[in-house]
Image (spheres, rainbow, N blue to C red):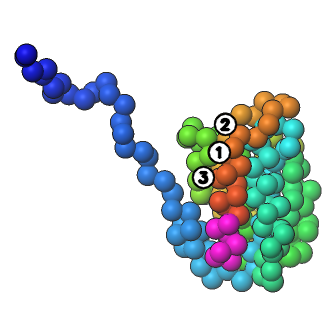
Amino acid sequence: MPQKKKPLLKKNRPSSKRPKQLDLKKALTNSLKGASRVAILGVGSELRGDDITGMVAAEIIQKAAHGGLKVFLGATAPENLTGEIKKYAPSHLLIIDAADTASKPGTISLIDPKTVGGISFSTHMMPLKIMVDYMLKSIRCKAIIIGIQPKVLKFGSEPSPEVISSAKEVAKVILEIV
């Protein structure tokens, strides 16, 4: 029986290598160096599937929050909390939201606020970039955006399990290091 030839090029075969995942704990630990007061701002809508992800993470964190950590539930109008956040005077502001980074659903990304214009965020009353720019000018804190890639944002849809799992992972890591 003749032996089958192995192809020289594996061009059309799917790659078995997964993209390198963000080491969230390491990345946040580095980003939060010197943090004395951390504000968490959860953003999202419960009416649009995975858009709820930032609120889910923030609510989990809120249940276990301790001194030096305060949670703000921004929902679809996080700009309404800028005054309260300014009064808290955080050294660091973590914004958790669904963010379309063209990744696999549930992928967690740390996003530099200066690059927000190129990333599509969920449903907000005011563009997130404008709110973040205002916060940074008026508070003088370090801002970090934690974006979770949504799977579905259709009105009336349920959140997807992989995205909710990522929201829980974000909350767990934040509570471990702050």
Q: Which residues are magenta?
A: 172-178
Cα distance in 3D space between marks 2 and 1: 8 Å
Q: Residue at x 15, y 26 (%)?
A: 6
**Quick one: label 2 or label 1, which is nearer the N terminus?**
2
Prevalent SS, magenta region: helix
- Going by the numbered disc 1, the residue's amino acid type is Glu
Q: Residue at x 85, y 44 (%)?
A: 45
Farthest-out residue, left: 2
In magenta stretch: residue 173: yes
Mark 2 and 1 residues: CB-CB less than 8 Å, in contact? yes
Q: Position of residue 111 (x, y in %)?
A: 61, 55
Query: Callout 3: helix, strand or loop?
Result: strand
93 and 71: which is toward the camera: 71
Badge 3 local density, few (<14 within 10 Å), some, or many (20+)? many
Q: Residue at x 31, y 24 (%)?
A: 12
- Going by the numbered disc 2, the residue's amino acid type is Lys
Residue beneath disc 1: 162
Of circles 1 and 3, the one toward us is: 1
**Quick one: label 2 or label 3, which is nearer the N terminus?**
3
Residue beneath disc 2: 151
Q: Position of residue 170 (x, y in %)?
A: 66, 61
Image-based side of 131 in relation to 6, left or right: right
